[in-house]
Amino acid sequence: MAKEVFNVNISPIEVNKIIKEKIRAEMVDYEECKLESNKYITVTTFQKYYLRNNSNAALVLICDNTLGNTRVKAVGTGGGTAGLAFDFGAGDSFAAKVKELLKSYIVN
């Protein structure tokens, strides 16, 4: 399992739009919860086949702007082969791709 957690200066809706357009993976599910004052919580799940380990990996993307800037949490998981937890870096690659796609929006 790999996890990337960081803040960006765009809304959760914009984060999801960018990731959906740019990531090379199948979107499995998307949930959006609109709170008051343009605050959102979004949860998106993606799936991608990795040839290097002959299995699918999953990415769970959780975004919220309830405390100000949008907090992005990308968790890459799965991808192990033959009952082994070793995924040859598939989870790391999946989670890192989100951060790479959003790098121009990252704030402290």
Image (spheres, rainbow, N blue to C red):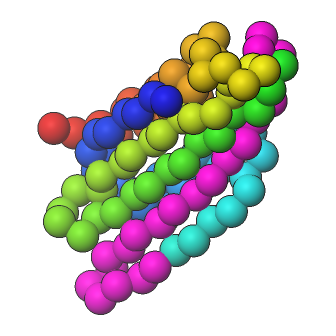
Q: Residue 71: where, in percent of width, then height?
A: 30, 52
- Residue at coordinates 72% horizontally, 25% vertically from top-left? 83
Does any portion of residue 17 appear in the rendered image? no
Does any portion of residue 69 appear in the rendered image? yes
Q: Is residue 23 left or right of residue 77?
A: right
- Residue at coordinates 29% horizontally, 40% vertically from top-left? 6
Q: Residue 100: where, in percent of width, then height?
A: 47, 26
- Residue at coordinates 44% horizontally, 55% vertically from top-left? 62
Chief secondary structure of the magenta portion: strand
Instruction: Name the quadrant containing residue 57.
Output: top right
Q: Is residue 73 magenta?
A: no
Q: Is residue 60 left or right of residue 35?
A: right
Up the image or down, 43 lies above or below 105; here it is: below
Up the image or down, 29 lies above or below 86; here it is: below
Q: Where does the C terminus fall, quadrant-wise?
A: top left
* Magenta-drawn segment: 33-53
Up the image or down, 8 lies above or below 2; here it is: below
